[in-house]
Amino acid sequence: QVHLVESGGGLAQAGGSLRLSCAASGSTSRINDMGWYLQVSDNEREVVALINKAGDTDYADSVKGRFTISRDNAKNTVDLQMNSLTPEDTGVYYCNAEDDDRTDYWGQGTQVTVSS
């Protein structure tokens, strides 16, 4: 089992910045990919950014050049630096981790609100 706890988020003005952090505990040695997702409907979360153990990253087109995902394998943390925020970035962001069995784990979610 992996437990994820998020921090950060909150309120920002358009053009501003926020940083999300996620700390993993439990069976962290089994974690492979980690990432951040945005809840876009009651039943759907879209990937925002992904990072594997080697540090390779992938981003949604909408955030490329604005968001940066980083990971500290020793501390079992993954962060999302969000710059040049727009109101369209508003929503609940979830930290995700996938283990060796391809089981997904999720944090509790953190609200990001960007005002225009």
Image: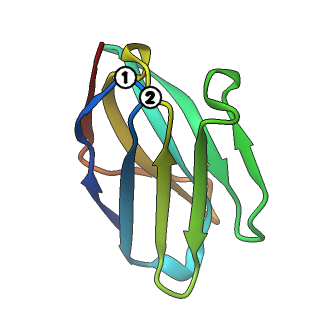
Residue 1 visible? The answer is: no
Residue 60 is situated, as x and y percent measured from the top left of the image, at 66, 28
Which picture quadrant has residue 112?
top left
- Which residue is at 43% across, 20% downward? 86
* Residue found 37% across the figure and 23% down from its top: 14
| Figure colour scheme | rainbow
45 to 23, vertically: above or below? above
**Residue at horizontal 50 percent and vertical 31 percent from the top:** 84
Which of the pair 3/9 is nearer the observer?
9
**How many numbered marks are there?**
2
**Residue nearest the viewer, comparing 62 with 46:** 62
Q: Amino acid at mark 2?
A: Leu
The location of residue 41, given as percent across then percent down, is 35, 11
Tell me the crowding category of disc 2: few under 14, some 14 to 19, or many 20 or more residues within 10 angstroms, Cα based: many
The image quadrant of residue 66 is: top right
User: Mark 1 or mark 2: which comes first in sequence?
Assistant: 1
Q: Which residue is mark 2?
A: 85
- Which structural element holds mark 1? loop
Helix, strand, or loop for circle 2? loop
